Image (cartoon, rainbow, N blue to C red):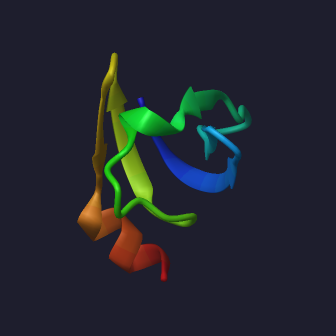
Amino acid sequence: MKGIIDRFEEDLVVVETGNKTPDFEKRLFPADASPGDGVNIEGDKITILKDKTVNRR
């Protein structure tokens, strides 16, 4: 699943995926993740999509 980090809430990360905003545990994300970053989520593996992030900023 691909999405965009919307915000951080304590130990959670809210990700926009189309019209949904599921929450994920912050510990699953890379330390340098920030709101606006594009992400790819595969189970417990989350990676930042550098090209998608650059295009959005």
Q: Is residue 23 above or below residue 53?
A: above
Give the residue drawn at x 29%, y 56%: 49
Task: Count numbered badges in the picture.
Answer: 0
Give the residue drawn at x 56%, y 29%: 24
Which image quarter: residue 33? bottom left
Residue 17 position within the rendered picture, expressed as x and y whole percent measured from the top left? 59, 38
Give the residue drawn at x 39%, y 48%: 39
Residue 36 position within the rendered picture, expressed as x and y whole percent measured from the top left? 54, 66
Q: Nearer the viewer, residue 35 or 52?
A: 35
Task: Give the left or right position of residue 37, taking residue 45 as reference.
Answer: right
Q: Is residue 13 above or below residue 22?
A: below
Residue 25 position within the rendered picture, expressed as x and y whole percent measured from the top left? 53, 30
Q: Is residue 3 above or below residue 27?
A: below
Q: Nearer the viewer, residue 47 or 25?
A: 25
Q: Nearer the viewer, residue 33 or 20?
A: 33
Residue 55 position within the rendered picture, expressed as x and y whole percent measured from the top left? 39, 77
- Quarter placement of the N terminus: top left
Residue extending farthest to the bottom is 57
Task: Give the left or right position of residue 57, taking residue 44 as reference.
Answer: right
